[in-house]
Image (cartoon, rainbow, N blue to C red):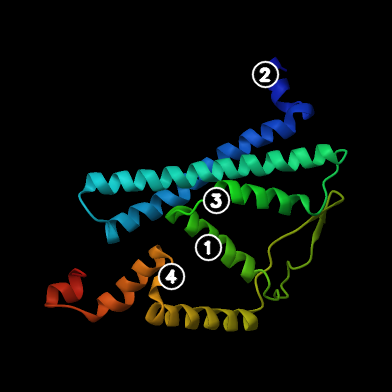
Amino acid sequence: MSTPHAWLLNPAFHEYLAILKGARNGFVYGVKVRLPHALIMAILFGRGDWKTRCQAIFRATKEHACNLAKFVSLYKTLLLLQRKANGGKERSADTFVAGLIGGYLVFGERSAVNEQIVLYVVSRVLASFLPRAGTPYSSSTPTTGATVIRPVPPDARYFSVFAALSWGAVMWLFKNRGEAIQPGMFNSMTYLYRDSEVWADLRTLLWRNK
């Protein structure tokens, strides 16, 4: 086995290399998620010429990718430090502490991209409190002595109520307190619900929005 290969597979370096790999994966995932979204938003709602729109796409994609890379690497680093401070054992609260500090340092500065990411996370946290459905894979499956946890969808009855309340609330906000809605969603809702009330001819009715 070559020396570089042995070094990469050496258990002594695994925790440190995992931080590097986490940063890499965070950056790649950020590009995959943000680039298509920014491109579509530039086409639908972008202002200015295409040079200006491309610059906006690049900035949003760079910010999303870099922030995810920073958060993942910082989160893993903080977990490692806490484990070492506790004799190599991870405590239940370690993930919360690492996420708390990482979230404040990386996503604490308000920007359009950070706000969207935080809102995405908040919606998933709130949805996690819905009772889970009883499905064939709802129980943990033992594998080589370990327990594998798999996501279980929400109970359909509770999800129906959750969806109804969410849509009722956001439509009320859009009508009565539009300034409180995240800008990206506000633009989308304007396109769907307000712009669809206005047209001047057959072209702006079926072909172009305005």
Instruction: For mark 4, give the secondary structure.
Output: loop
Question: Which of these two is toward me, 139 or 54?
Answer: 54
Residue 155 makes an appearance in the image: yes
Q: Residues within 10 Å of mark 3 (few under 14, many from 20)?
A: some
Residue 113 locus on image (x, y percent): 45, 53
Q: Which residue is mark 1?
A: 119
Q: Nearer the viewer, mark 2 or mark 3?
A: 3
Q: Is label 3 or label 1 in front?
A: 3
Compare marks 4 and 1 and give the one earlier in the sequence: 1
Nearer the viewer's eye, disc 2 or disc 1? 1
Under circle 1, the secondary element is helix
Distance from the alpha carbon under mark 3 to that under mark 4: 19 Å
Left or right of 31? Residue 136 is right
The type of residue carrying mark 2 is Pro
In the rendered image of this protein, does residue 30 appear above or below residue 147? above
Q: Amino acid at mark 1?
A: Leu
Residue linked to disc 4: 181
- Which residue is the site of mark 2? 4
* Picture quadrant where residue 2 is located: top right
Q: Nearer the viewer, residue 157 or 74?
A: 74
